[in-house]
Amino acid sequence: MSCPFPEKEGRPPGCEDGEESEGCSGVQCVIGIDPDVSGGLAVLKGDTAQVFDSPHLKVLVGKTLRKRLDPRSIVHLLQSFGAPRGTTAYIEQSMPFPQDGKQGWWSGGYTYGLWIGILVASGFSVVPVSSRSWKDHFELFGSREAAIALFPSLESQLRRKKDHGRAEALLIAAYGKGLGGKK
């Protein structure tokens, strides 16, 4: 899946002749996304890495308050990166397990589809990645430990057990960029 905007003369859309912007300066920008409601988003830009929780809000579903992704906040977050159109976003494919139940299946498909829709509409090229492929690449047993090993400067943001979504987003982006893992 790619953004619906054509490139001009091999340059990303939005870069005019002779004009250099932050996104067009030759620094590769890669985005990694763990699409779960408790997932995360990571941006690798040159030698820097940033990681964020997936923006969400609480919504009343029947008589139960449930976490749902916040599309408006996702759009604002993506725009804040200043990434040029056509930037590649790697997203983990949603694979429900039989024991997840109907609500889990619906939620997984909804969040995955919502992320893809927002990314494509925002001009990103989207590459779905199976969890098996990126986890095998890193010979993964613990996502937080592997992410800390690759990105030690982000250790303080990956300490808690609930930071696994951030860690997975970082590893998905690193997989897309070709960092670490099997040689």
Image (cartoon, rainbow, N blue to C red):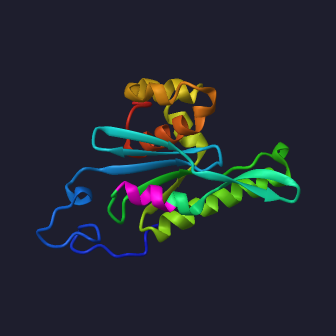
Q: Residue furthest right?
A: 63
Q: Nearer the viewer, residue 175 or 73?
A: 73
Q: Is residue 24 visible?
A: yes
Compared with 115, 143 (above or below) is: above
The x, y position of residue 51, in whole percent, is 46, 41
Compared with 29, 183 (above or below) is: above
Residue at (64% x, 43% y) in the render: 38
Compared with 78, 164 (above or below) is: above
Q: Is residue 55 magenta?
A: no
Secondary structure, magenta segment, majority class? helix
Q: Is residue 80 magenta?
A: yes
| Quarter of the rendering containing residue 89 | bottom left
The x, y position of residue 14, in whole percent, is 27, 71
Residue at (53% x, 58% y) in the render: 73
Span of residues in magenta: 75-81
Quadrant assignment for the C terminus: top left
Q: Is residue 93 visible?
A: no
Q: Nearer the viewer, residue 14 or 181?
A: 14
Compared with 25, 19 (above or below) is: below
The x, y position of residue 113, in whole percent, is 63, 63
